[in-house]
Every structure is written in structure tokens, then in C-alpha cells.
Image: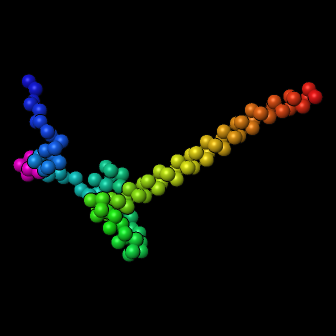
Amino acid sequence: MSKARIEGTVEAWERGELGLSEEHAVLSDLTIADLDETLSLQMISIRLPKELIEDYKFLADRLSMGYQPLMKQVLKRFADCELKQIAREKMRADYEKSRAKAESPKSHASRKRA
């Protein structure tokens, strides 16, 4: 026996026709600490210039999101980009090192023949 598929489910969720009914909601016994642990989140405290916070709030409003999730996205993008750059530099250095090592015996061999 299969359940009937509700047509337009994605649209129904987006419009709020599905998922907002309290009769289908279940209260969780998870604490905020449990949630943070599950999502690998850690609370931090940071002092930022008021103008920067206002800029984030403006941008977040334009993107229809909260400013703190936007800050998390920006920090994540920055860290990912920096880590990729470090990896590229390491790969380039390793490549150059192996290339120099591979060419080194050839140059010694050609000098011996001469």
C-alpha cells in the first residue's frame, strides 16, 4: 500500500500550506546546547564597529535573511577561499619541487657526457 503523493508539494511548503500546522508539530526535548553540539556550533563574542553591523543588516534585509546568518556565510566564504589559496600555493610549491628534482639528474647526466 503506497501513500498518495500530494501534488505541488514544494510550492505548498513555500506558500506555507504545509508545515505550519501545530497539530503535526512535536515538541523536542533538545536543549540549545544539544542543538549547537549537533550542528557543531560554538557561541563566540566579538566586538564590531556599529557601522559594519548596520551594513550587514542592510545587506541581509536586501537578501531577505538575518544579518547573523549572513555574517556566518561571509566568514565561511572567506575561510574557504583562503584555505583554497593555501592549498594551491602548496600544490604549486610541491610541483615546482618535484619538477626541479626530476630535472636535476638530467642536468647532471648531460654535464658528465660533455
**In the rendering, at what x and y percent does residue 103 appear?**
77, 33
Q: Quadrant of the C terminus?
A: top right
Left or right? Give the position of 102 relative to 114. Answer: left
**Image point (91%, 26%), residue name:** 113
Q: Residue furthest right?
A: 114
Whether 75 is among the magenta residues is: no
Q: Predominant secondary structure in magenta?
A: helix
Left or right? Give the position of 9 relative to 50. Answer: left
**In the rendering, at what x and y percent does residue 61 appear?**
28, 64
Q: Residue furthest bottom?
A: 50
Left or right? Give the position of 104 relative to 112. Answer: left
Residue span colored magenta: 20-24
Instruction: Tell me if residue 80 can be seen.
Output: yes
Q: Quadrant of residue 45?
A: bottom left
**Image point (29%, 57%), residue name:** 33
Q: Residue furthest top?
A: 1
**In the rendering, at what x and y percent does residue 28 appear?**
17, 51
**Image point (37%, 69%), residue name:** 55
Q: Is residue 23 above or below residue 5?
A: below
Instruction: Tell me if residue 25 can be seen.
Output: no
Left or right? Give the position of 39 relative to 10. Answer: right
